[in-house]
Amino acid sequence: MRFVKDPRLPAGNQVGNELYENNRLDRGHVARRADLLWGSLPEAQKANTDSFFCTNISPQMDDFNQSSKNGLWGELEDAVFADVDVDDLKVTVFGGPVFQDDDHTFRGVKIPREFWKIITFTENGTLKAKAFLLTQNLDQLEALDLDEFRLFQVTLAELEQRTQLLFPAALHKGDTLAVPEAVTDRTPLDSLTDIQWD
């Protein structure tokens, strides 16, 4: 399917396909299409259509968004099933861009350098919440060589500070990550096996 502007919002408040033409920017799903296709057939069909609205994408460099290019971001949501016995195989994911005043402007649109994701699930009846921050290098947006991207496991408190969002106390209770150093001093994840699910 082709991405289209969301008819529920003014078209002038949305960025369309023109941003993504002839460059390395990818239409990064905020909510993955595959994760939305559940429920009754009419619900799944509506969710499929909704997943292709421009309001469900954010510009990301292609080499970290696409799991087919070994992008950790694209593979992150599947990783929980490889290492955790998730109750009822149910996972809830929250995510989006981190906006900053000095974000790179491309074709008149500010492109986020950072994205966040929270993966929540229950294991043996206990709620767990794992938070991640991905940074992308936009210095060579139109270049053909690979751009640097880094994936960090962070705490919900760190995400709240960066995004200015507030997450419910129940999610904070499920966040057990203990890190002594700031994100800027932390080593990024080299592979998905570095994730602390416990």
Image: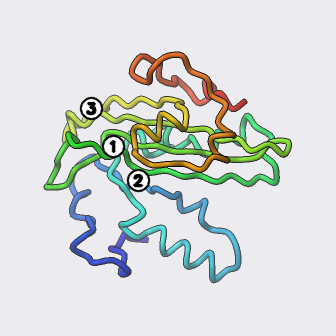
N-term-proximal mark, 3 vs 1: 1
Q: Nearer the viewer, residue 183 or 75?
A: 183
* Residue for point 38% across, 31% down: 149
Task: Work out whether 91 lies above or below 176.
Answer: below
Work out how far the residue at label 2 is from the one at label 1, CA to CA, in angstroms. Answer: 8 Å
Q: Nearer the viewer, residue 160 or 10?
A: 160
N-term-proximal mark, 2 vs 1: 2
Instruction: Describe the element under mark 3 as helix, strand or loop.
Output: loop
Mark 2: few/some/many CA within 10 Å (<14, 14-19, 20+): many
Q: Amino acid at mark 3?
A: Asp
* Marks 2, 3: nearer the viewer: 2
Q: Amino acid at mark 1?
A: Met
Instruction: Describe the element under mark 2 as helix, strand or loop.
Output: strand
User: Does the CB distance between marks 2 and 3 fall below 8 Å?
Assistant: no
Determine which residue is flagged by label 2. 28
Determine which residue is flagged by label 3. 145
| Residue 70, visible in the rendered structure | no
Side (left or right) of 43 relative to 71: right
User: Count of labels shown?
Assistant: 3
Work out how far the residue at label 2 is from the one at label 3, CA to CA, in angstroms. Answer: 19 Å
* Residue for point 43% across, 69% down: 52
N-term-proximal mark, 2 vs 3: 2
